[in-house]
Amino acid sequence: MRTARIASILLVGAGLITYSGWLLEFFVPTGVSPVRDPVDALLTGPPVFRIVLAVSGISFFLAGPPLRRLAPVQWQSRIGAMSVSVFGALVLGYAAVPGNVVLSLLLNAVFVVGAASLVLWWPPGWRRIAVVGLVLVLATWLAVLVAGVFGEFEGVFTRLQLVVRVALLGAGAGYVLLTSGSQQAHRDG
């Protein structure tokens, strides 16, 4: 269990850092407007953006099995753990084929399923975080869709969506970091 916990934290941590690679746009000349252009436009620019996105996809994909080992046996927790792997595979696919509408929809759907699974199985204190996260995930998805239709502030909302995703995945990493050791001690004792 200790190895699974360490692997989960390291892989999710690496995924979070590289999934935040879009922040490099403030240091690398891209010609992409952070206000108007969706964050996906970065993937057609300097290759560093596709590389960091691919690395994040690999990290999240590999984090799924150790997370599954740590998760309780209920189906809700297993769905949450496996959602991280599926999300990683889709992110990797999106890095390979940027702008793919089907992959984009699947990424959003898998993230919603993963967030909803946390609401179903996290304990009460953590569940509040999961509920807020799920609401923010749905709200930013809606904002991205509306901004895409009206063509206003699409860049802002797609970047906000990534911030919300990183925050919720970070909360998940915090849950693993802060609760797995106490759960293991409880099982052993």
Image (spheres, rainbow, N blue to C red):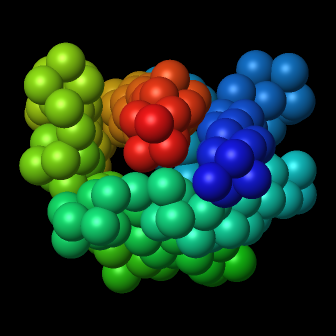
Residue 106 pos. (x, y %): 33, 73
Residue at (79, 59) in percent of width and height: 55
- 186 sits left or right of 40 in the view: left
Residue at (23, 46) in percent of width and height: 118
- 29 sits left or right of 42 in the view: right
- 101 sits left or right of 9 in the view: left
Residue at (22, 39) in percent of width and height: 122
Residue at (47, 28) in percent of width and height: 182
- 73 sits left or right of 98 in the view: left
| Up/down of 141 relative to 160, above or below | below
Q: Quadrant of residue 31?
A: top right
Q: Quadrant of the image for the C terminus?
A: top left
| Up/down of 114 relative to 15, above or below | below
Camera-nearest residue between 187 and 121? 187
Residue 111 pos. (x, y %): 32, 56
Q: Is residue 132 visible?
A: no
| Up/down of 97 relative to 134, above or below | below
Q: Quadrant of residue 112?
A: bottom left
Camera-nearest residue between 183 and 44? 183
Residue 160 pos. (x, y %): 40, 28
Q: Quadrant of the image for the N terminus?
A: bottom right
Q: Can residue 77 be seen in this view?
A: yes
Q: Residue furthest front?
A: 189
Residue 13 pos. (x, y %): 69, 38
Q: How many labels does the image show?
A: 0
Camera-nearest residue between 183 and 53? 183
Camera-nearest residue between 77 and 72? 72
